Image (spheres, rainbow, N blue to C red):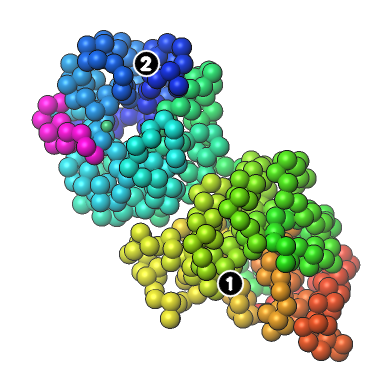
């Protein structure tokens, strides 16, 4: 006996809505047929307005349509309608009839799915024999206002990973996400919901298809976006990040990256704070790249098309800046241009923490760069509801293994993490580098951390196929320049350090242009 639903394509799961606000004056059966033609593999009839008899009539029509196309047909809530209409199964909410009772009515072959918001609900559902889980709401949605909670991408990832880890049943229970999903966020969701031992099987949508002008086009777009590699990941060679390379190989690659960067002179687009903007712009110029300090969402897409990278720095941001940041981040995400998040003082206030959470839930960041306390705050925040996933995550802050912390955050967020400090730690979750270059004076003037972020995006912009090594090259370029500055006889302290540092950056930039990569021999 085969488990019900295993032959179902959950990639694109359509949930219907016949309200005026979403369906408008279109014909529901017609819209569902168009959606099926666009690639929907399973349809849930969700009806909140009709009386039982009219609902049954519609259920039978939709079932016939679905089965004509070999698509699974599920009824929301109403086990009786599912039974009489001959549906393939039922979708239950947490307040509906229990899975086991529904199974008594519908039988062993029925597909029974259930909505889950928490890990506990998900584990219970698996225990009770659910055939798939509907996880959400991922984002706020006007389609269903009484959702049990907005759990974000990290909430989806927690559930997937816990279900896979703790399920006593070796059988596969597909997980589908729902809530506010559309073409602006499904690639991010797919990319970032990936847990070490589990992944999202598909997406369930209402308004993105039912409310669209052409359901076939809408379904096609959603499905292909969900399936295809996102633009920011198309060139990556994550298996070639360096762990198999000898130090000499790495250094010669870093040399190529630095040379290429100063030759191409990429744009470093900064949405940064008022304290460091001037210094960061000077650093970028001295280092041979091209700074643009613009907070204007109106020109973000044009700037992204210049092929450079973007820095989002929260140093003096207010929540009102979030939509400005998101416009820019999404413009860069669309083209695959690198984006770096500098979560300044993220652990200091709730406002900052909430802003960072929102940003990570709405856009892809290739790199998160912070000091020890910022990275610790991020890592522990995201582990709050994720204890035990990885023993390292539970390390109390006293004796943190920084390399492990950085690597674990990188794995969870699916990005590169750089923790700056006396020793810097850099990881993509697979390969981790520690860097012992740099000088004390980098801590004695403001903006040195922020300006490093500005340099990193320039380097990564021209070397997208290996973002980790490009980041490493930028860090070394920067910190070795700082060493040269401090050794400059005129450098007597923080005041002199700034001009000496700009001179040293210019010096190294000139060396790179002249293909003299001696400076790299200082790499530690
Ligand atoms: N269930 P849209 S959210 C039916 O969180 C439903 O369980 C949800 O609609 C849950 O795709 C939702 O238009 C509505 O955002 C999803
Ligand atoms: Mg329900």
Residue 117 relative to residue 37: left or right: left
Q: Which-is-in-front pick, marks 2 and 1?
A: 1
Against 16, is 236 above or below? below
Q: Position of residue 126 (x, y in %)?
A: 22, 44
Q: Residue at x 79, y 54 (%)?
A: 292
Mark 2: give few (<14), some (14-19) or many (20+) Cα within 10 Å: few
Where residue 507 sits, quadrant-wise, is bottom right
Q: Which mark is residue 371?
A: 1
Q: Quadrant of the C terminus?
A: bottom right
256 in magenta: no
Q: Which mark is residue 69?
A: 2
Against 487, is 73 above or below? above
Mark 2 secondary-structure assignment: loop
Q: Which residues are magenta?
A: 94-106
Which comes sooner in the sequence, label 2 or label 1?
A: 2
Mark 1 secondary-structure assignment: strand
- Magenta stretch: dominant secondary structure: helix
Q: Residue at x 44, y 40 (%)?
A: 140
Residue 10 relative to residue 169: left or right: right
Q: Residue at x 26, y 35 (%)?
A: 93
């Amino acid at each position: 006996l085969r488990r019900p639903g295993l032959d179902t394509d959950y990639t694109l799961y359509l949930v219907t809505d016949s309200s005026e606000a979403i369906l408008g004056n279109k014909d529901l059966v017609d819209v569902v047929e168009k959606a099926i033609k666009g690639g929907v593999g399973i349809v849930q009839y969700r009806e909140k307005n009709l009386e039982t008899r009219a609902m049954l009539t519609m259920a039978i029509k939709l079932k016939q349509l679905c089965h004509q196309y070999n698509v699974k047909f599920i009824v929301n809530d109403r086990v009786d309608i599912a039974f009489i209409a001959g549906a393939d199964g039922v979708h239950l909410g947490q307040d509906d009839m229990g899975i086991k009772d529904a199974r008594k009515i519908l039988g062993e072959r029925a597909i029974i799915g259930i909505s889950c918001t928490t890990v506990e609900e998900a584990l219970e559902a698996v225990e009770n024999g659910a055939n798939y889980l509907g996880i959400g709401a991922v984002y706020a949605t006007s389609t269903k206002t009484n959702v049990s909670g907005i759990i974000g991408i990290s909430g989806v990832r927690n559930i997937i990973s816990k279900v896979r880890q703790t399920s006593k049943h070796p059988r596969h229970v597909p997980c589908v996400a729902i809530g506010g999903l559309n073409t602006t966020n499904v690639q991010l969701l797919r990319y970032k919901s990936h847990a070490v031992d589990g992944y999202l099987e598909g997406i369930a949508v209402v308004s993105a298809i039912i409310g669209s002008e052409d359901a076939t086009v809408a379904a096609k777009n959603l499905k292909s976006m969900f399936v295809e590699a996102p633009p920011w990941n198309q060139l990556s060679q994550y298996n070639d990040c360096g762990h198999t390379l000898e130090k000499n190989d790495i250094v010669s690659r870093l040399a190529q990256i630095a040379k290429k960067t100063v030759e191409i002179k990429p744009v470093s687009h900064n949405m940064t704070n008022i304290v460091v903007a001037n210094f960061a712009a000077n650093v970028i110029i001295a280092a041979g790249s091209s700074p643009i300090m613009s907070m204007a969402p109106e020109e973000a897409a044009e700037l992204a098309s210049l092929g450079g990278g973007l820095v989002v720095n929260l140093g003096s941001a207010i929540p009102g800046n979030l939509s400005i940041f998101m416009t820019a981040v999404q413009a860069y995400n669309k083209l695959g241009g690198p984006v770096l998040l500098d979560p300044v003082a993220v652990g200091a206030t709730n406002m900052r923490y909430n802003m960072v959470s929102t940003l990570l839930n709405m856009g892809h960041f290739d790199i998160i760069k912070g000091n020890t306390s910022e990275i610790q705050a991020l890592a522990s925040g995201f582990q709050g509801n994720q204890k035990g996933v990885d023993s390292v995550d539970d390390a109390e802050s006293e004796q943190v293994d920084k390399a492990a912390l950085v690597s674990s955050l990188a794995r969870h967020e699916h990005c590169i993490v750089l923790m700056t400090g006396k020793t810097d730690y850099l990881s993509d979750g697979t390969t981790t580098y520690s860097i012992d270059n740099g000088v004390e004076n980098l801590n004695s003037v403001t903006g040195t951390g922020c300006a490093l972020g500005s340099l990193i995006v320039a380097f990564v912009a021209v070397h997208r196929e290996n973002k980790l090594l490009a980041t490493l090259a930028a860090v070394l370029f920067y910190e070795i320049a700082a060493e040269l500055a401090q050794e400059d006889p005129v450098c007597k302290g923080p005041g002199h350090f700034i001009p000496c540092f700009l001179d040293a950056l210019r010096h190294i930039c000139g060396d790179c242009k002249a293909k003299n990569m001696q400076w790299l021999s200082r790499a530690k």
